[in-house]
Amino acid sequence: MDSPPHAQLHDGSEKPLHDLLIIGGGINGAAIARDAAGRGLSVLLVEKDDLASHTSSASTKLIHGGLRYLEYYEFRLVREALGERERLLGIAPHLIRPLHFVLPQPPGGRPGWLIRIGLFLYDHLSGRGTLERSKAVRLSGSGYGDGLKRETAKGFVYSDCWVDDARLVALTARDAADRGADIRTRTAFVAARRDGAVWSATIRDGGGAQAVRARAIVNAAGPWVGQVLGLTEGVAPERPPRLVKGSHIVVGRRFRGEHAYILQNPDGRIVFAIPYEQDFTLIGTTDVPFSADPQAPAIDADETAYLCESVNRYFAAPIGPADVLHSFSGVRPLFDDGSDDASAVTRDYVLKLGCDEGPQYLSVFGGKITTCRRLAEHALTDLAPFLPAMGPAWTADAPLPGGDIAGGDFDGFVAGVRARWPFLPGPMALRMARAYGTRIDRIIGDARSIDDLGEDMSGGLHAAEVDYLVAQEWARTADDILWRRTKIGLHTGAATRAKLEKRLAGAGG
Ligand SMILES: Cc1cc2nc3c(=O)[nH]c(=O)nc-3n(C[C@H](O)[C@H](O)[C@H](O)COP(=O)(O)OP(=O)(O)OC[C@H]3O[C@@H](n4cnc5c(N)ncnc54)[C@H](O)[C@@H]3O)c2cc1C
């Protein structure tokens, strides 16, 4: 692809000049980088670790309006998120798929009339979408009641969508790079100060510190947004974000069927139980105020007990901490709206401009995976007066890499993958079709047998895919591949990791 018009980075100074320096390679930083690069701006994104290595790989992985936010009157957020649900499904039909949610109605739960009103609103705020509308169902004796205790006889079913959050970030960053953005992982933003009409910033990677300049800075550092603000001279201080930890547990599959459950708890919170990676059930999340270092949050015993109790109220076969095969925790960097209750703090995003004059600085607070595309559009609207002329908004209908699937027909696409490469085992064909969409061709290409894909690392991961992830998706370590570019870590063990590390060492990782 040709370089965008503003990518001539030098203006006589020794240090390169970018239109935008974006700090943070989570979903928000990646989405802003993609949108800006597609409008012709020169973009440098720095991420201190791996893409999506923090909050953006620890979500519940729903592309949803957020039914429960209606109880907090977050109508703007819910309407926007429901609109985005449909758009994201359109631009990434490989990565995002519709999912039915079963809401059992227990004795003592929210009254049926309240749920009906909530679902009516949810359906209507969605507009004329492609997803099925909600309905009341009998659970006992139907597939929707599988695994549940017999006394939970009635409930409702509604639709939302599912996404592999970390892959959404990687593909968004890939598209940004395809459109000219410079994406640098393992590169930390260290400091910045004004230098006339631009920012002079220091970034640091494994090779040492470098100086760069930018017309504007975007602080999309998630849980570090407050800390990163403090690294820049001359920006108005903001209230620190409200950090709220949310944890998930993964257990062996607890029910048949492709639907998920949304379970009401006596404290008014809800917990999801979602089919996960074929063999598992994902259960989450908690909402715990958090004040420690967000680098590696971990689930605690109380959260595990809470999640087990939540599902044990509904499922016939109880689970306990010993059944937990895997867990992960993330820290929500929420805008502090003064709420006492962690579950009630707004999940909406807030963008703050930090300078009255000179080069501009924008900080991102809160947000959802679901609303990343709109957040990016709003960020660029806010920054437009401080940047060179840029193109119009364009991301609503532009497919993400691999998302150019004819008619969005994913099932038809998978059938085509199986027909073209009949030697691929069924689960591997499906996994790769979901992960790469039409770009699967760039990995499998002319291979005529599974052996042509190189060394088998187990779990359906072969050398050809590893090499592609290194070359195209910034993968450097075994964890990048086992837990973020794929979820093969759930299905494999130490032997796979050892083989992968050897291959990555050979690739310079
Ligand atoms: C438990 C939980 C469940 C959720 N479930 C959902 C859901 O189902 N659906 C949904 O839509 N949303 C969900 N969310 C919300 C969503 O995950 C977040 O809003 C989103 O991931 C935030 O993305 P971000 O880019 O702002 O932050 P992050 O993903 O944390 O990215 C910020 C990045 O900035 C980097 N960084 C920090 N400091 C520096 C520096 N100095 N230099 C360079 N890089 C730096 C960090 O390393 C990090 O990778 C959930 C959140 C949580 C915690």
Image (cartoon, rainbow, N blue to C red):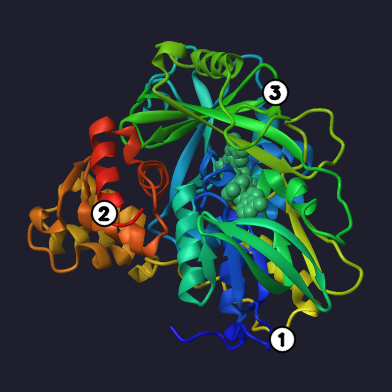
**Distance in Å between CA atoms under marks 3 and 1:** 49 Å
**Residue 68 drawn at (x, y percent):** 67, 36
Kindly report which numbered mark, 3 or 1, lies closer to the viewer in this rendering: 1
Q: Provide the residue designation for mark 1.
A: 389
Kindly report which numbered mark, 3 or 2, lies closer to the viewer in this rendering: 2
- The residue under the point 28% across, 31% down is 494
Work out whether residue 284 can be spotted: no
Residue 280 lies, with reference to residue 30, above or below; the image says above
Residue 164 lies, with reference to residue 436, above or below; the image says above
Q: Provide the residue designation for mark 3.
A: 268
- The residue under the point 56% across, 18% down is 310
Which amino acid type corresponds to the residue marked 2 in the rendered image? Gly
Q: Earlier in the sequence, mark 3 or mark 2?
A: 3
How many C-alpha atoms fall within 10 Å of the one at disc 1: few (<14), some, or many (≥20)? few
Toward the viewer: 329 or 418?
329
How many C-alpha atoms fall within 10 Å of the one at disc 3: few (<14), some, or many (≥20)? few
- Asked whether, in this view, residue 232 is left or right of residue 481, the answer is right
Q: Earlier in the sequence, mark 3 or mark 1?
A: 3
Which amino acid type corresponds to the residue marked 1 in the rendered image? Ala
State which quadrant residue 496 falls in: top left
Q: Provide the residue designation for mark 2.
A: 506
- Asked whether, in this view, residue 265 is left or right of residue 492, the answer is right
Please tell me whether mark 3 sits on a helix, a strand or a loop. Answer: loop
**Residue 332 drawn at (x, y percent):** 67, 40
Work out whether residue 234 can be spotted: yes
- The residue under the point 64% across, 84% down is 391
